[in-house]
Image (cartoon, grey):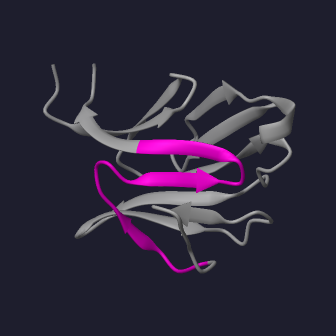
Amino acid sequence: MSDEICLLLQFVSGDALRLSLQEWVLGRKGAYLSALARSGETQLLPLSPEVASTISKAHARLRCAEGGIFVEDMRSANGVFLNGLPLRPLHPAPLVAGDRLRLGALLLTVSLIPCQE
């Protein structure tokens, strides 16, 4: 078991994305939510057509930097909301466990968990 921490994005449906602490871009790829890491790793989760239509191809960036984890709206069409408040495009905001993110019509809850090997 690793001591490394991962970011868990939990969907209302019960699905989740487990992301290592690096830079990720969240966006739409067809009928999927795509999480693309700077390292080239990709994760996909299916979305309903109604939700997929509200997600931009490059909607939000998540990144780990000195001092914490940050989320940034990448000039998405339907915005990024952190705990109900809209983010200004290209202005990173800090994320902490328990935060609620909304990308278009997609609702997510943020957790920090141990990474699995």
Does residue 105 appear to the left or right of 88 in the view shown?
right
Q: Position of residue 96 (x, y in %)?
A: 29, 57
| Closer to the camera in the image, 12 or 80 | 12
Q: Is residue 111 magenta?
A: no
61 on left or right of 32: left
Q: Is residue 72 above or below residue 23?
A: below
Spot occupied by residue 98 in the image (x, y as percentages of width and height): 32, 48
Q: Which residue is at a point 37% across and 54% down the rendered structure image?
A: 99
Q: Position of residue 48 (x, y in %)?
A: 79, 29
Which corner quadrant holds the N terminus?
top left
Q: Quadrant of the C terminus?
A: top left
Q: Is residue 48 at least partly visible in the picture?
A: yes
Query: Per the image, is 95 magenta?
Result: yes
Note whether 17 is above or below 72 in the view shown: above
- Boundaries of the magenta span: 90-109
Name the image quarter holding residue 107: top right
Q: Quadrant of residue 78?
A: bottom right
Give residue 22's position: percent from left, percent from top.
40, 51
Q: Residue at the spot x=57%, y=63% of the render?
A: 81
Q: Nearer the viewer, residue 6 or 79?
A: 79
Seen in the picture, residue 83 relative to 15 is either above or below; the reply is below
Q: Can you see residue 29? A: no
Q: Quadrant of residue 3?
A: top left
Of all residues shown, which one is farthest toward the front? 84
Question: Which residue is rendered at x = 45% and y = 61% of the image?
Answer: 83
